[in-house]
Amino acid sequence: MTFQPIFEPPRPILIAGPCSAETEDQVLATANALKNTGVSLFRAGIWKPRTRPGAFEGVGTPGLKWLRRVKEETGLAVTTEVANAQHVQECLEHGIDVLWIGARTTVNPFSVQEIADALAGVDIPILVKNPINPDYKLWVGALERLHQAGLRRVAAVHRGFSSYGDFKYRNAPRWQMAIDLMQEFPDLEVICDISHICGRRDILTETAQKAYDLNFDGLMVEVHPNPNQAWSDAAQQLTPDAFQDMLRQIVRRAISTDDPDFLARMENCRSVIDEIDEEIISLIARRMLLVREIGAIKKDKNVAVLQPERFRALREALLRRGEKNELSPEFIALFLEAVHQESINQQEQIINARNEAVSRER
């Protein structure tokens, strides 16, 4: 599965605009403030899928005319979110340059397929946000459905994932999933939606720098003339001036260099890391041997595999140790989740194997 670029060089790609198109004046004011900032694509939500009824769900079709005025008056290309075939058709009729599929739509293969079918035979770029839940195959599946419909100018947007108990980010980044996508599809442009990852203005700049350091192709940022008065997602939007301040602060670094000293020092560090990784795997394997022994003991005593109190105590202890060793709580939580799930799987295998043995004896 190969893709063609949507955006011409140079990098980074910048996509910016309000979370929602609220009024024609608001849309045009934002676009005029952004037209000379290096923005590649002006974004504004017209149809807004909301978690609960009663929230602002977008201005709908009238907003498409406002986006068309943005194109005419500023020269900026425009994009908006689509969630069904009707949205696609209306966008095509109004000359929208790029479509995007939101996280709530990506999570539903039926909806993605409906959009793909509506776009069959149409050469228009489309952005695909990751699904709300951290399901890598679901994200790739959405890309595959569009590819099978003949679409090649496709890019991915990493906007983070819903998580329980993450107090820093609105949507946990889980950077590795986006990195995996970049590695599997090297010709796919991957853009970081820092606004939806952060959910708050005060960490947008550091998150944008993180995205640049991880070699994302660009950023999607929500910009509003008066963020505090925004009709949706007010806390995560920037003013146009604050957006330009952020761009001045973040640094786009080179991917690599031919400097011999750099290459030698990197090779030395990576060799040590490889040795440490091998040791880590060996230690985890030893841990799982003990886990299987615990599973056998639980089976003999007819004790449940999951022990909530033990897990809570382990989590608190690891978070304390992680903080002491300057490891983020997000990393510790992910590490513990993975290790704990593997421990449960290992113990269930022991119990199931013993159950099968008993059944055979009978």
Image (spheres, rainbow, N blue to C red):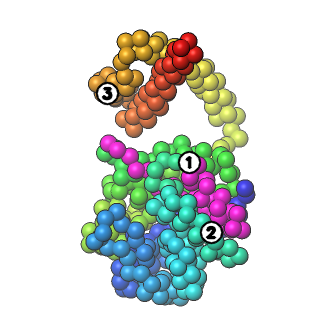
Residue found 43% across the figure and 77% down from its top: 46
Residue found 67% across the figure and 34% down from its top: 263
Q: Tell me the CA gap for discs 3 and 2.
A: 44 Å
Q: Tell me the CA gap for discs 1 and 2.
A: 19 Å
Q: Tell me the CA gap for discs 1 and 3.
A: 28 Å
Asked whether residue 9 is in view, the answer is no
Mark 1 or mark 3, whichever is nearer to me: 3
Q: Which residue is mark 2?
A: 116
Task: Give the side of residue 196 with respect to residue 228, left or right.
Answer: right
Sequence-wise first label, 1 or 3: 1
Badge 1 density bin: few <14, some 14–19, many ≥20, Cα 10 Å: some
- Asked which secondary structure carries label 2, the reply is helix
Residue type at the position of mark 3: Pro
Q: Are marks 1 and 2 in contact (CB under 8 Å)?
A: no
Tag on residue 308?
Answer: 3
- Residue 11 placement: quadrant: bottom right
**Rendered position, 91 above or below 173:** below
Give the position of the N terminus as an image quadrant.
Answer: bottom right
Tag on residue 21?
Answer: none
Residue type at the position of mark 2: Ala
Magenta stretch bounds: 137-165
Q: Which residue is mark 1?
A: 136
